[in-house]
Image (cartoon, rainbow, N blue to C red):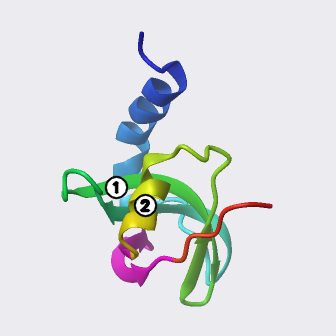
């Protein structure tokens, strides 16, 4: 049986991702907005992209999730090299993953 939340997020992301990559909803230099987080699949080795909300402070973007089983989170734990799309541009990034309260 399919994981309903996972299927819903996947379908929503398919629609939202191109809009966010184009810059729609991007955070200002300080503030909350939509970004696309790019990571490398820990099993496939292929690029993976997911739209998430991010808080931007200058050149840093902080993202969070309430789903500790998110695949993008596990991918970043396996490989900290990433990229973040905002303002219509791809920016290379190095991820730091912190779990817990």
- Cβ atoms under marks 2 and 1 closer than 8 Å: yes
Whether the magenta-drawn stretch holds residue 20 is answered as: no
- Where, by quadrant of the figure, is residue 61 drawn? bottom right
- Residue segment shown in magenta: 81-95
Q: In this view, does 21 lie to the left or right of 54?
A: left
Query: What x and y, as percent, mark residue 69?
Result: 54, 43
The label on residue 36 is 2
Q: Which residue: 35% across, 76% down?
A: 89
Q: Which residue: 43% across, 44% down?
A: 16
Residue 23 at least partly seen: no
Query: What x and y, as percent, mark residue 76?
Result: 43, 65
The label on residue 16 is none
The label on residue 49 is 1
Residue 68 at least partly seen: yes
Query: What x and y, as percent, mark residue 84?
Result: 42, 72
Whether the magenta-drawn stretch holds residue 93 is answered as: yes
Q: What element carries label 2?
A: strand
Quarter holding the C terminus is bottom right
């Amino acid at each position: 049986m399919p994981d309903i939340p996972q299927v819903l997020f996947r379908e929503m992301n398919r629609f939202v991702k191109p809009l966010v990559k184009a810059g729609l909803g991007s955070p200002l230099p300080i503030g909350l907005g939509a970004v696309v987080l790019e990571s490398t699949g820990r099993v496939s080795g292929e690029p993976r992209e997911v739209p998430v909300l991010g808080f931007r402070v200058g050149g840093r973007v902080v993202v969070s999730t309430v789903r500790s089983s998110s695949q993008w989170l596990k991918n970043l734990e396996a490989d900290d090299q990433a990229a973040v799309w905002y303002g219509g541009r791809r920016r290379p990034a190095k991820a730091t993953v912190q779990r817990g309260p």
